């Protein structure tokens, strides 16, 4: 994977590659393990009203011919811009790439009279006013999913971690299911929807739950089991290819990665880097369990899904089930995050990411993006001010080189 760039054809919710590419033709083991890639989705904003603007084509025209053009892509809505890093070895490398991309996208937007922001939802924009990007794959997606697709005015953060064996990758995904609540609680940044506080820390999760083939993935016995299920969906024409499966965590066979998709788009760049370190060390933790011949623990889907719901509702204050110990009482999700950090810190140190991993403790200390937005809103009850702060925080991170 070293030096590879995620192609536009394999990113995004409506994207895919040509039919006939089998999940059996995977790239697991064809690259260095634990290398990383990150995708972020940004909002395009009016600099005065801070509502969304429908100008992705204007941005794409402005970046034409620039060296970063291959890393900047459209998304389903014309008010969204997606960036994808090249493959990196460490979270520190990810930080450098994202800083460069945020700085470039932010400067282009300002030159065109726009702003950019990163959060799981836009606090007050309405999906009815958004236009679908003029690409065949997005038109086809709306034709297939109808209202559910048109309503999908949400923004996410996706972290890819390379794994060197498909059987190992299956078990890694199974192990990560117990961490869905932790990942969502740390990244939640969408407490508003359509101009109203929802009482949730991640409204994005509730919106995206209506998508088919979303939510936590099922547990697969092995890679053949996975390939058989995906193959059935492809052969019957239910999906064009496996990228039309939008689970919270999924295999990406063409890249040879485990893709962690549950996170809301995150405003603070340092938090993105910390979450990347958290994901990378977790993957290494479970890979090494498999290599030692240990059984990766798994829990009933209803239990892991309940913890995910609690994290979406309460964020870092979520009272979740402690599935590892089997205790009958619930515990704060932050307590489980701290326990996970102790387990994975040695892996982060071996990966050269222990400093970045410490940033997770910062999130626990000061709160996640949703907490930050609610503090600003509660001060003056001004929802436009919330979006102003999102844009300022996104862009301050970008230009502070």
Image: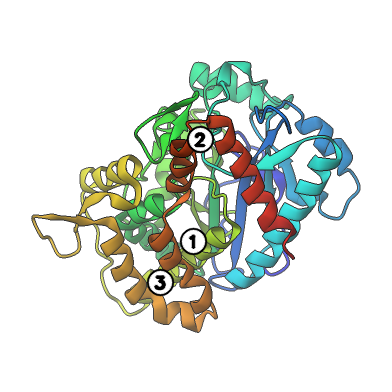
Check disc 1 and report the residue beneath it: 275
Q: Secondary structure at mark 1?
A: helix
Q: Nearer the viewer, residue 303 or 127?
A: 127
Q: Residues within 10 Å of mark 3 (few under 14, many from 20)?
A: many
Task: Residue 104: give x, y in percent of width and height.
Answer: 79, 52
Can the viewer see residue 73 in this picture? yes
Q: Residues within 10 Å of mark 1 (few under 14, many from 20)?
A: many
Asked if the residue at tag 2 contacts the one at tag 1, i.e. Cβ–Cβ closer than 8 Å, the answer is: no
Q: Secondary structure at mark 2?
A: helix
Nearer mark to the viewer, of 2 and 3: 3
Image-based side of 9 in relation to 221, left or right? right
Check disc 3 and report the residue beneath it: 287
Earlier in the chain: of badge 1 and badge 2, it is 2
Q: Quadrant of the N terminus?
A: bottom right
Q: Residue at x 29, y 51 (%)?
A: 317
Q: Residue at x 57, y 55 (%)?
A: 268
Q: Secondary structure at mark 3?
A: helix
Check disc 2 and report the residue beneath it: 234
Per the model, the C-alpha gap separating discs 2 and 3 is 29 Å
Task: Residue 116: give x, y in percent of width and height.
Answer: 69, 41
Per the model, the C-alpha gap separating discs 1 and 2 is 33 Å
Q: Nearer the viewer, residue 355 or 10?
A: 355
């Amino acid at each position: 994977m070293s030096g590879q760039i995620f192609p536009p054809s394999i990113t995004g919710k409506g994207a895919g590659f040509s039919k006939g590419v089998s999940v059996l033709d995977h790239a697991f083991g064809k690259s260095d393990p634990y290398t990383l890639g990150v995708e972020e989705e940004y909002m395009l904003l009016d600099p005065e009203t801070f509502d969304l603007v429908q100008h992705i084509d204007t941005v794409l025209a402005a970046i034409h011919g620039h060296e970063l053009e291959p890393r900047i892509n459209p998304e389903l809505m014309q008010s969204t811009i997606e960036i994808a890093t090249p493959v990196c070895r460490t979270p520190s490398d990810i930080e450098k790439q994202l800083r460069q991309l945020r700085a470039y996208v932010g400067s282009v937007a300002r030159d065109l009279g726009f702003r950019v922001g990163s959060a799981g939802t836009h606090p007050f924009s309405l999906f009815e006013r958004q236009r679908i990007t003029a690409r065949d794959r997005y038109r086809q997606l709306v034709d297939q999913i109808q209202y559910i697709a048109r309503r999908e005015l949400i923004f996410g953060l996706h972290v890819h971690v390379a794994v060197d064996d498909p059987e190992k990758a299956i078990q890694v995904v199974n192990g990560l299911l117990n961490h869905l609540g932790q990942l969502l609680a740390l990244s939640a940044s969408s407490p508003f929807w359509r101009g109203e506080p929802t009482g949730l820390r991640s409204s994005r999760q509730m919106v995206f739950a209506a998508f088919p083939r979303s939510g936590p993935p099922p547990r697969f016995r092995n890679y053949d089991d996975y390939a058989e299920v995906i193959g059935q969906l492809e052969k019957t024409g239910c999906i064009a290819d496996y990228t039309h499966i939008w689970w919270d965590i999924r295999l990406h066979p063409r890249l040879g990665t485990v893709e962690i998709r549950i996170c809301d788009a995150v405003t603070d760049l340092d938090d993105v880097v910390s979450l990347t370190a958290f994901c990378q060390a977790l993957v290494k933790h479970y890979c090494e369990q498999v290599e030692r011949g240990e059984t990766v623990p798994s829990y009933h889907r209803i239990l892991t899904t309940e913890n995910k719901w609690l994290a979406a509702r309460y964020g870092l204050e979520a009272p979740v089930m402690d599935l590892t110990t089997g205790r009958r009482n619930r515990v704060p999700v932050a307590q489980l995050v701290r326990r996970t950090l102790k387990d994975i810190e040695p892996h982060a140190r071996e990966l050269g990411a222990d400093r970045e991993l410490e940033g997770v403790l910062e999130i626990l200390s000061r709160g996640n993006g949703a907490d930050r937005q609610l503090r600003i809103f509660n001060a003056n009850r001004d929802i436009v001010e919330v979006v102003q702060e999102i844009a300022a925080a996104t862009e301050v991170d970008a230009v502070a080189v």
